Image (cartoon, rainbow, N blue to C red):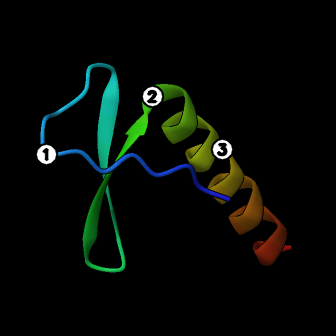
Amino acid sequence: MMVVVRDTHMPLNTVPVYRHGRKFYVSIEEFERMRLEERRYRRTLMQ
């Protein structure tokens, strides 16, 4: 699940994320959680 904030102005403490060819702005906390979840997911795939 991803909370997406798409704004014309760039909000503070957000990170641009490219998904499906679109640009999203997510909070830094959300971005960190996404990266951790992806890493965990990849690790389970490798086993």
Q: Which residue is mark 1?
A: 8
**Side of 13 where 44 appears, left or right:** right
Q: Quadrant of the N terminus?
A: bottom right
The answer to whether marks 2 and 1 mark residues whose Cβ atoms lie closer than 8 Å is no
Of mark 1 and mark 3, the one earlier in the sequence is 1
- Discs 1, 3 touching: Cβ within 8 Å: no
- Inspect the image, locate mark 3, and give the three-letter code of the amino acid beneath it: Leu
Q: Is residue 3 above or below residue 21?
A: above
Query: Does residue 20 appear left or right of residue 2 in this picture?
Result: left
Type of the residue with mark 1: Thr
Query: What residue is pinned by disc 2?
Result: 28
**Vertical position of residue 23 compared to residue 4: above or below:** below
Residue 36 is tagged as 3
Amino acid type of disc 2? Ile
Residue 14 location, x and y as percent?
33, 30
Query: Foreground mark, 2 or 3?
Result: 2
- SS class, disc 1: loop
